[in-house]
Amino acid sequence: MRRLLPAVFLLAALALAPARVWAGQDDPRLDALFATLKTAPSDEAGAAAERQIWQIWAEHQNPEIERLMRQGIAAMNEDDADAALDAFDAVVKYDKNFAEGWNKRATVEFARGDYTASIADIERTLALEPRHFGALSGLGQIYLAMERKALALKAFRAALAIDPHLSGVRDTIQELEKDVEGTPL
C-alpha cells in the first residue's frame, strides 16, 4: 500500500495541473497571418492581418489572465499607470511565458519613464515571440527617448522587416537614416 500512495499523489497532481493551452504567441493561426502580413499589397490590406495578430497575442485560455489583461488595458486607457502596472505584474506572475503580458508591462514602464525595466520586458517579449513587431517598435521608441538613434534605427528596421505596413515606422526610419548614416553624396 505504501508504494501505491506516491503514485496516487502523482496522478492527482497531474489531473489538477493545468493543461497546456494556446497562449497568444503559441497560437497556430499566427503563421498564416504573418505570411499574409508579408504579402499584403497595401498598408490597408496589411492592417487587417495586424489587427488579427494583436487580437491573438492578447488572448489567453486562463480567464483570470484575460480579466487582468482587460483591467490593465482599461487602466492604461484611463492613464492610471499604477493600476495598469499592477495588473500586468499579476499577468506575468501567473504566466511567465505569455509574451503580450510582458509587452503590455513594458509599455506601461516606458510611459512611466522606466526605460531599463521596459527594455528588459521587451527582451522577454521577443524571447517568447521574436516576430513581435509592436515590441520592436516600442524598443525603437525607447532608444529614441534615450537619444540612442543607431539602436532605435536597428529596432525600427527589425519591426519593419516583420511588418512592412508600419507606415509611421517607415517614416521614422527615413528620418533616422539621415541623422545616423548621413546624406549620401
Image (cartoon, rainbow, N blue to C red):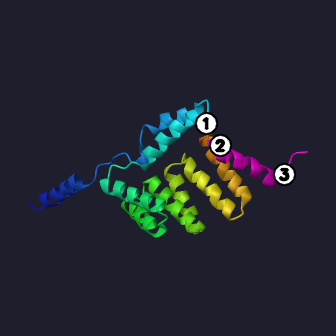
The tag on residue 182 is 3
Instruction: Specify the farthest residue to the front.
Output: 78
The amino acid on which the numbered mark 3 sits, given as a three-letter code, is Gly
Residue 42 lies, in percent from the top left, at 61, 32
Q: Is residue 5 visible?
A: yes
Q: Nearer the viewer, residue 7 or 174?
A: 174
Q: Is residue 25 visible?
A: no
Overall secondary structure of the magenta section: helix
> For the residues marked 3 and 1, what is the alpha-carbon distance in whole angstroms?
28 Å
Relative placement, left or right, of 116 versus 171 is left
The quadrant of the rendering that contains the C terminus is top right
User: Which residue shows up at 53% across the image and 32% down it?
Assistant: 36
Pointer 1 residue: 43
Q: Which residues are magenta?
A: 166-185
3 or 1: tag closer to the N-terminus: 1
Pointer 2 residue: 167
